[in-house]
Amino acid sequence: MGDADITLRHLARRHPGDLVRALVPEGEPIEVLGWVDSQVTHIERRLDKALRLRIDGEPRVLHVEFCFALRDDVPDRVFEYLGFLFAALRLDAPGEPVPPIESVAVVLSGRRRRLPRTEKRRTAWPGRPFSGTHFRVDAVYQRTVSELRARGSVLWLVFAPLARDATEAALREVVADIHAAANTAEERAELYTALLVMATIDPWGHNLRKELIKMMEDKEEGLLRRTPIIGEMIIEAEQRGEQRGEQRGEQRGQERGKQEAIAELLGRLFARRLGRRPNAEEERSIIERARVLGPGEVEDALLDLEGEALVRWLAEPIRSS
């Protein structure tokens, strides 16, 4: 899903409690323990989509899959993911029972007719009892702006441009809510960026992106221009690097300029995740991984991995894909 996937994963990590409260049945005491950080993270980094919980005192795991649409391959993806997740949870606590797992697909676009509340991936032979997995479907694009606002969190406000009844007036109120609720200018910028990414998906043809940009600029002039989407930052870094190299007039200078620009931006993302700048060895690893795996792969790791897991990943030998 490109920018949408990066943006939503980042926001989910910033607001795990808000994510959980809307997806777990009301009335049950919930404690969010954190994202799954496993020994198999370096094999399947999407494990960052699973949260450890304690519900009414019992361990649980919630898996959230953001989907552009409920395509035919989504049940396969959910089933495949659960295999990785189950193996990871077993490895982390040998001999202990694996906590019950529930999966939810948050769907951003698709058909106008109501999607089912649950879907399944059947693996049993025809005529045999069911085996496989069921998962819940949360079609946020089929909800109203009021329903999303009722979830009581800035996280769910960013989905408002997807709502079937989204209007310029309704989104103006959403922008005001975000402006009032966000704790910092950085958080406002992240939320505004997510709003714009959702408006680009535009499942109902509302075509409100230009109006949204104007609303945000009216609230805080220049904020969006100062905070481009992370993916765009990487592209801009590569372009700036090529320009630097051309000015030097040699291929070696071009490559060095590109690496410097990418390292600068990826280093800022590293610092934001760990609260410190990368040391010389970590910076070399970031540059080399961006060269071998591509900047997008490194960006994913910087968003996905927490603390020591990120440091370990940078220290591992590079496995080219």
Image (tube, rainbow, N blue to C red):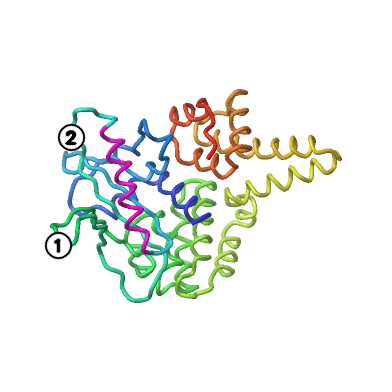
Residue at 23% x, 44% y is 30
> Which amino acid type is marked by label 1?
Gly
Foreground pick, 150 / 197: 197
Q: Which of the 4 image quarters holds residue 243?
A: top right
Which region of the structure is painted magenta? 72-90
Left or right: where 154 falls relative to 121: right
Q: Secondary structure at mark 1?
A: loop
Residue at 56% x, 45% y is 296
Residue 227 coordinates in the image, percent (x, y): 60, 50
Q: Which of the 4 image quarters holds residue 89?
A: top left
Residue identifier under label 1: 127
Q: Secondary structure at mark 2?
A: loop
Residue at 47% x, 26% y is 312
- Residue 182 covered by magenta stretch: no
- Figure check: 29 above or below 71: above
Residue 48 coordinates in the image, percent (x, y): 39, 42
Q: CA distance from mark 2 to mark 1?
A: 30 Å
Foreground pick, 187 / 252: 252
Give the class, few, some or many, for how many residues have Cα within 10 Å of label 1's Cα (few <14, many ≥20).
few
- Residue 73 covered by magenta stretch: yes
Residue 102 coordinates in the image, percent (x, y): 24, 50
> Which amino acid type is marked by label 2?
Pro
Residue identifier under label 2: 97
Residue 179 coordinates in the image, percent (x, y): 49, 56
- Figure check: 7 above or below 308: below
Labels 2, 1: front one: 1
Left or right: where 262 falls relative to 76: right
- Figure check: 37 above or below 183: above
Foreground pick, 159 / 259: 259
Give the class, few, some or many, for how many residues have Cα within 10 Å of label 2's Cα (few <14, many ≥20).
few
